[in-house]
Image (cartoon, rainbow, N blue to C red):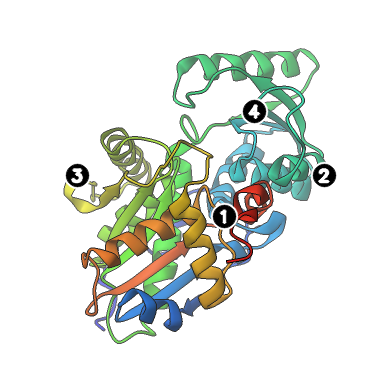
Amino acid sequence: MSSQPSHAISVEEVSQRPRLALASLPTPFESAPRLARHLGLETLHIKREDMAGYALGGNKLRQLDFILAEALQDGADMLIATAGSQSNFCRSLAGAAAKIGLGCHLHLRAKMGTEHVGNLLLDGIFGAKKSFTSQTDPWDPAIRAELDDIAAAYRGEGRKPFIVQLTGTSASTGVVGWMAGAAELVKDFTRLDRQPDAIMVVSGSGLTAAGLALGFKRLNCKTRVIGVSAQQPEARLREWIIATANEAAGALGIPERLAADDFDIIDGHVGPGYGIPSEESIAAVELAGRLEGLVLDPVYTGKGMAALIAQAGRKVLNGKSSVVFLHSGGTPGLFTHSAAFAHRAAR
């Protein structure tokens, strides 16, 4: 493979932004030959973000290294965030807050009395305070107004709150985390005979896909980023990825900008809805477990794996395709859906 071009993302370029070093990096880059053969792919590798370190890992840890550095620089002593009750992001944030000695308040999309299992259980173990909202759309301005009210209450107590919102003010900083991740992947690729044709990543907030696509463009890496939506329709997610990536590029002072044809979005695997397993995602979790010992979950990574299986089945990806699957973590979520697997256990 050719060496990186002179305009590659450098340590100095990324370090223009404040950064912590909480995540355990680099994460493993592993071959999955049995699954590759089963799917009819030339090669398949797994980027193991589930092994990124504290709080059971996940792709959000790279983002939080940058976001929380800004919070500390701002003098924050209380982190405030919102997401679903089984949010991997909120669990990671609560763990990070515990690790660096900050308070954490999670304003969750769930009803009071929701069973404390999976990520919600871990939120409490990490010491996060919790409140609940009836809002269902994380992009709705009303949710930001609720966060602002919570922050105002803490300021009234003499605290210094910092709102972390991946669908808002923290988005472009999160993208920077995965631009650094793109540079790490390009180093991983030097171990291969050639750059992979595609990397598949399940996309909720879309920041991982945004950082990868912008980072690869900056590095002149031709590996195609394929984002698999876990929630949003294709057009909305694509627009958001472009906007946040280009905001990050402007903040870093680099000339590259993302366009619609720089990456792909697949939105046909959301299934019954956000946070709800589908039959194909359950089957994908089982396949990855039985062929490679991988632990996926049925609402995020399982849907990403289902998309990979479908693309291989339709020969969009085939025997000439070298593919990377980004395991974004989410392991605690598996244990909230045991009933979905119960009727399949004897098969």
Q: Residues within 10 Å of mark 1 (few under 14, many from 20)?
A: many
Name the residue located 76 percent from the left edge and 23 percent from the top edge.
Answer: 159
Quarter of the image holding residue 286? bottom right
- Disc with the residue nearer the chain's start (2 vs 4): 4
Quadrant of res 126 = top right
The one nearer the camera, 309 or 48, is 309
For the residues bearing labels 3 and 2, Cβ distance under 8 angstroms: no
Any mark on residue 297, and which? 1
Residue in the image at 48% along x and 37% along y: 274
Q: What residue type is labelled 4?
A: Leu
Q: State the separation of the CA atoms marked 1 and 2.
A: 21 Å
Residue 206 x, y percent position in the rendering: 40, 44
Q: Mark 2 points at which residue?
A: 125
Residue type at mark 2: give it: Ile
Spatial CA span between label 4 and label 1: 20 Å
Residue 171 spot, x, y in % from top left: 45, 38
Which mark is drawn over residue 260? 3
Disc nearest the viewer among 3 and 4 = 4
List the single residue furthest toward the left. 261
Q: Earlier in the sequence, mark 1 or mark 2?
A: 2
Location of mark 4 (residue): 108
Left or right: residue 17 versus residue 133 is left
